[in-house]
Amino acid sequence: MNRKNALLFVAILLIGGLATLQYLRRSYEYKSNQFLMDTLVTITVHGKDETQLKQAVTEAYTEMHRIADLADGFPQPGTAAYNSSDVCRINQQAGKQPVRVDRDTIEMLLLAKKYNRLSDGAFDVTIGPVMELWGFGGKNPHVPPADKLREALKLVDSGNLEVNETEQTAFLRKTGMKLDLGAMAKGYATEKALQVIKKHGIQKAMIDAGGNIRVLGSNLQGKPWRIGIKDPRKSDGIVAVLPLENSSAVTSGDYYRYFEAGGKRYHHILDPRTGYPATNSMSVTAVTRDAGLADILSTVFFVLSPGNALDLARTMAGVELFLVSADGHIRHTPPLLSRLEVKPGESYRYDQGR
Ligand code: ADP
Ligand code: MG
């Protein structure tokens, strides 16, 4: 070996050693919680650079807050929060004039209109006036008088929500109409936050926004993340375990937000055809890559009958559905059969899906 080759040999050894050290440096898990959009949001990220992980999570939360502020329907008029909410500004100008809004608001509203059509009206973000009558947003929810419900229902129609992409404006045609993005904003914000994390070069992450789950890559052990689907009647139980990789699972249930009156349970997901809570299912989980779409679909499938929901899910590429129907049957789309671990216990019936 001449001198030049010997030097080269040492250099290669050194570089190889450094690369191995770098490889062996341990992976960190960084986890952080924030109360956001009326729920506890937990972000977990894995990677080797702790500073980068923290920075990514901070930016992800900032992005979630931004979407939350645009979609917030509750601030009082005159406040800064009211003026920075596109939903409030659109509602205020209902029947008057179009309002210029953020690009993300346009995107959410276009999605809302699309899935309103696809679900034959089961999903409708103009449900605002009816939601308000039930008072689910406030401290004192109650069953509204039937005549008032009928009146409010006349205002519910996504066909009267105009979205102008080129002007970047939105307009509710009738006075009294009100947007409510409660069924989709959390999922949309979750997806945007995940994209922020991804841009930082992070390959393993999970966002849990109160049952809206989005995962990036696999877990620290290189296996799919394992998601428990809650038992809709036992708060500490689960009915299934779903392995999830690069995808999202969003559950809509009748047990998240409800009150009881006259021995009946009234919850916050309404059937826009009746104005009353949808009664077909106790719990519905939509599984698809995009958390925004999964959130929309969880509500769509919750309002539809289980049969119609399963039929619709089957026509959608990359979409799976798991549900517990009102009569206690566990059903799901066929491809989930090989992935799911179903635990029906004594409370539910499971005949391998159908
Ligand atoms: P969660 O809020 O528990 O995540 P969902 O995603 O199903 O559950 O959203 C429920 C919210 O969606 C309600 O609080 C209300 O704001 C709104 N909403 C209720 N019924 C409908 C409907 N049929 N279509 C669209 N939005 C709805
Ligand atoms: Mg939803």
Image (cartoon, rainbow, N blue to C red):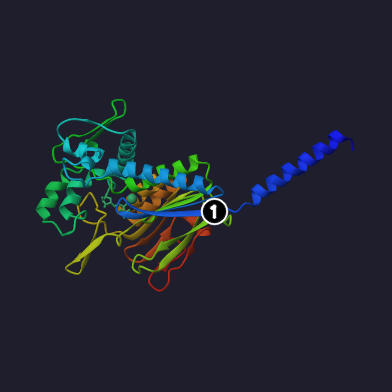
Q: Position of residue 135 (x, y in %)?
A: 18, 55
Q: Is residue 133 left or right of residue 277?
A: left
Q: Is residue 98 left or right of residue 344?
A: left
Q: Quadrant of residue 258?
A: bottom left
Frontmost residue, 107 versus 42: 42
Total marks drawn? 1
Residue located 17% across and 35% down the image = 93
Q: Position of residue 9 (x, y in %)?
A: 81, 40
Frontmost residue, 112 versus 79: 79
Q: Is residue 228 left or right of residue 252?
A: right
Q: Secondary structure at mark 1?
A: strand
Q: Position of residue 345 (x, y in %)?
A: 42, 72
Q: Quadrant of residue 120?
A: top left
The residue that mark 1 highlights is 28
Residue located 40% across and 42% down the image = 192
Q: Position of residue 116 (x, y in %)?
A: 30, 42
Q: Is residue 61 left or right of residue 140?
A: right
Q: Is there any visible trace of residue 193 in the rendered image? A: yes
Where, quadrant-wise, is the C terminus in this rendering? Answer: bottom left
